[in-house]
Image (cartoon, grey):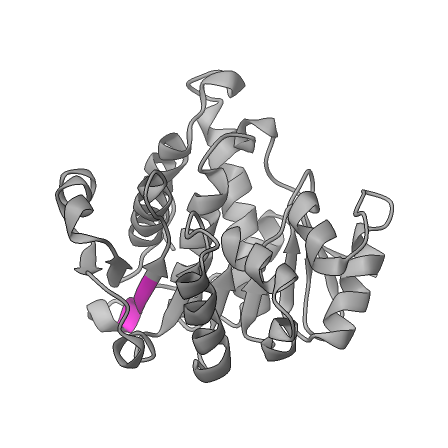
Amino acid sequence: MVHLIDDFYFQQHIHPRNEIGNKYSFGNIIIIAGSTGKWGASLLASKAALRAGSGLVTAIVSEDYEESFLSFCPEVMHLREWNLSKILSYDAIGIGPGIGLDDATKHHLKELMRKYEGPMVLDADALNIISTTENLKGFLKPQHVLTPHYGEASRLFGKKVSDSNAVQLGLEFVQKYPCTLILKGPNSKIISSEGIVYQNTSGNDALATAGSGDVLTGIITSFLGKKYDPIQAASLSVFVHGKLAEICLEEQSKSSVIASDLIEKLKGFEL
């Protein structure tokens, strides 16, 4: 049985905002993304998390790029270097977009997967590292949300993924490595660590643009930081992400939509 993620699902599962909450009530999260030539990934994910309602967002940013961050989004706080003990204290982690594949990055990811017990989004380069690093899949946990498109899923599963076999391969994967899996594409599928399948009903091909996945990573991390369980965080985020693309078309063409447009449309959601 496939459960549909639609407006009714959204209304049934979205939490009312805590009117007497403080910034810590809405999640203190960290985004680990970007590297030389790809710092935009961190900018997009971080700002999306803030727009999705996170109370506090920190990013790891080299000193050379702090000024760019401040001009784009002064609300994002920064760490200048890897500090595992501090990173382990955050409510949720989003890691992967644009981080690269060097040895230090692989080591840091392995440290997090072994030692961090909170919820974590693993996207892009984090997925590629898991796919190519021996035994790393064994550290996957139900509170880990993986967000592969079909190409990344093919590397992760070790088999070519298509519309016809994506769900079956995904079910086989979570049975062996319990985690929360988002198979990104038209009508994205979300598979819980228990093997329950959900299908998204929102979105359009305006999402096929650079940085769109980084925005999704930020939104999911925000939901996780606000204590949504992984399957709800994944399902609600994918639905909202699709809705953002639909709303964009009220004012512009599909081909003109860029990732920053999606973030701006988050202003209309009470998350």
- 75 vs 131, left or right, is left
Residue 28 inside the magenta-drawn segment: yes
> Residue shown at 25%/67% (left/top)?
19
- Which of the 4 quarters of the picture holds residue 191? bottom right
Q: How many marks?
A: 0
Residue 192 inside the magenta-drawn segment: no
> Residue shown at 84%/58% (left/top)?
168
How far across and how far down the image is residue 61, in percent? Answer: 24, 54
Image height check: is 140 above or below 102?
below
Residue range corresponding to the magenta coloring = 25-30
Image height check: is 150 above or below 172?
above
How far across and how far down the image is residue 18, in percent? Answer: 30, 69
- Which of the 4 quarters of the picture holds residue 112? bottom left
In terms of depth relative to the viewer, which is nearer, 87 or 262? 87
> Residue shown at 38%/60% (left/top)?
222
- 192 vs 87, left or right, is right
- 111 vs 164, left or right, is left
How far across and how far down the image is residue 6, in percent? Answer: 63, 48
> Residue shown at 68%/44% (left/top)?
151
